[in-house]
Structures are given as C-alpha cells and as structure tokens.
Image (cartoon, helix red, strand yellow):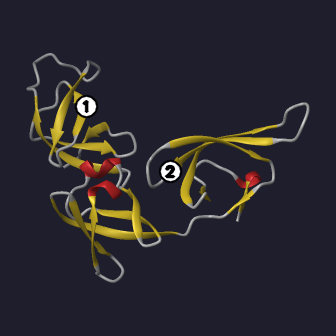
Amino acid sequence: MISTSEFRSGARLEIDGEPYYIVEFQHVKPGKGGAFVRTKLKSYRTGNVIDRTFRSGEKFEEPNLEEREMQFLYSTGEDYTFMDMSNYEQFTFPKSQLGENVDLLKENTVVKILLYHGQPIAMELPTFMELKVVETDPGIRGDTATGGTKPAVVETGAVIKVPLYLEAGEVIKVDTRTRQYVERARS
C-alpha cells in the first residue's frame, strides 16, 4: 500500500485496476477544509496523462509489476523478440506494447521490460545509446557547433536532430529519455 504522504515522482499506483505512475504531484493545505494532493498520473498501458485529486491520507495498492532484464534479438515487422537474461527464454512482443522509444532499439541491446500480469507494458532503454547516422544532409564548410540543427536518420530508422556539421556515417550518442543528440561517440 502507498499513502498520499509517500507520493513522489515516478511512484507507481493502481487506480481502477490500471497501473499508473506519478508524473507530478503537489500537496495542498487550504486555509479552510482538509489537505489534499493534486497529481498528474500517466497510464502505463495507454500513455494517457490524467489529473486526479486525492484526500490526504488516502491509500492505494501498488500494481503487480515485474521488471526483467532482456536482450533485444531481432524484429519481424511489428513483432520484437527478446531473450530473458536470467533463463535465456525468448519472448515476442508486439511493437505497440513496448512504448514510444522502440525505434531507438538496436540489436543485442539489453533493456528492462516492465511486465504487468505477464504482459509487457513498458520498455526502459539504457540512458544513452550509440547510433550510426545513415542519412542526413551534407555538412557545409563553416557550419559551427553552436549553429542550428538538422534531421538525421540513424541506423534504427529513428529521426534525431543533430548539429549541422555532422555527416552520414558518424556514430553519435543519443539520450533516450529526451531523444536528443548528446555528442559524437568516442571510438
């Protein structure tokens, strides 16, 4: 059980039989009446964000979530196959169940899969991934690091904004939380 006094960003709770995590929360003590907590909750299943207000002291069940470390093996169309790192069992999940960053997934990458009653509801990539730029506009002499950005297609098919001076064939480091270019990868 989790109480409203234990709320923090990222805390997981089950509301109406659905798993959510707290994006934002604010404890409010009005001059008149009881204290309450305003929250923004994001659904693991749908990705929708909802606003909810709870009375201070309310308790909630924590969802039955299991986190497993798995290695991405390959994809066939909309299906992605992973291997559990603890028992080498293979699982195939539809793309829709793996979240929005599935296009940054590279073969042999070890990720954390969050399971809810045996079904995957989220995938957590490593914080930084090194990806090769396969297509971008050519860099022009005089383009600087502080200039603008241009779209680049990386080896996984994702489109990332990169500095103007980068060329196709270079390996870059991408922050998977923000999907932003960090730096050139050190070789």
Dot 1 crowding, Cα within 10 Å, few <14, some 14–19, many 20+: some
Give percent across and percent down for residue 65.
51, 67
Q: Residue furthest bottom?
A: 87
Quadrant in the picture for the N terminus: bottom right
Check the image and report above or below for 170 versus 145. Answer: below
Q: Quadrant of residue 33?
A: top right
Q: List the residue tagged with mark 1.
A: 161
Q: Amino acid at mark 2?
A: Ser
Residue depicted at 74% across the width and 42% down the height: 37
Residue 168 position within the rendered picture, expressed as x and y whole percent measured from the top left: 9, 36
Count residues near mark 2 (Cα–Cα under 10 Å), then give few for <14, some for 14-19, many for 20+: some
**With 160 as the anchor, is 117 left or right in this view?**
right
Which residue reaches farthest right?
32
Q: Is residue 71 left or right of residue 171?
A: right
What residue would you read off at disc 2?
A: 43
Judged left or right of residue 108, residue 2 is right
Residue in view at x 81 percent, y 53 percent: 57
Which is more toward the observer, 51 or 86?
51
Total marks in image: 2
Q: Nearer the viewer, residue 128 or 142?
A: 128
Q: Position of residue 99 (x, y in %)?
A: 36, 52
Q: Earlier in the sequence, mark 2 or mark 1?
A: 2
